[in-house]
Amino acid sequence: LTRGEGEGEGEESWALRTVVVEVKSRVRRIARPPALHDQLQAVAYSLMLRAEAAHLVQTLGEEMDVSPVELHGPPMWHAANFEAHVLPRLRAFAAAVQAMRADVAARVSYLCGDDRWRDRLLRERGCGFLVK
């Protein structure tokens, strides 16, 4: 439930919204703020489930921290950045994997090559972002 403005003066209204709740059981410590990779994981789940936001819950024993992760607002604008940066790389990676699976010679060449050769093949297949 989220609180919004009501019809009249001083009135409140409530609305339902879909929120993904991801729970991380920590062993050492609770990260405040949560690590970026944890936030991005929650963003991916939220986008796949068409949720509006996520709550990243971290627990350590009896301690609990809840961090909201907004998809469509500052400071990270997660949904727009996911669309602009993460999805194109996922698509390029998936296309490269499919191409390598379809071409035995390319797959063997990649697997038997040294690091420089593998880096070159990754760049040629649009996956230069995987190269160190």
Image (cartoon, rainbow, N blue to C red):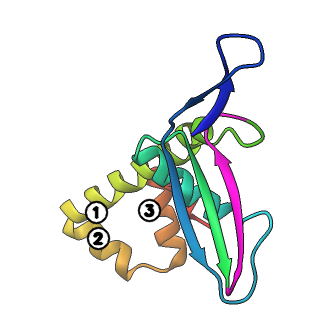
- Residue 89 visible here: no
Q: Is residue 95 visible?
A: yes
Q: Position of residue 111 (x, y in %)?
A: 36, 79
Of residues 75 and 69, the one nearer the viewer is 69
Q: Which residue is mark 2?
A: 107
Please tell me whether residue 78 is drawn above or below residue 104 in the rendered image: above
Q: Residue at x 68, y 38 (%)?
A: 77
Residue that badge 3 annotates: 121
- Using the numbered discs, state the Cα–Cα distance from disc 1 to disc 3 in whole angstroms: 10 Å
Question: Dot 3: few (<14), some (14–19), or many (≥20) neighbours within 10 Å?
Answer: some
Q: Amino acid at mark 1?
A: Met
Depicted 118 relative to depicted 97: above or below: below
Image coordinates of residue 59 in percent, x first then y, are 65, 77
Q: Between marks 2 and 3, how big is the CA–CA gap? A: 10 Å
SS for dot 3: helix
Q: Residue at x 50, y 35 (%)?
A: 16
Identity of the residue drawn at 71% across and 20% down? 11
Name which of mark 2 and mark 3 comes first in the sequence.
2
Q: Are marks 2 and 1 in contact (CB under 8 Å)?
A: yes
Query: Which amino acid lies under the numbered mark 3 shown in the image of this protein?
Result: Leu
Q: Position of residue 117 (x, y in %)?
A: 48, 71
Residue visible at 48% across and 42% down in the picture? 18
Helix, strand or loop for disc 2? helix
Specify start and end residues of the magenta stretch as a single range: 61-73
User: Which quadrant is home to the C terminus?
Assistant: bottom right
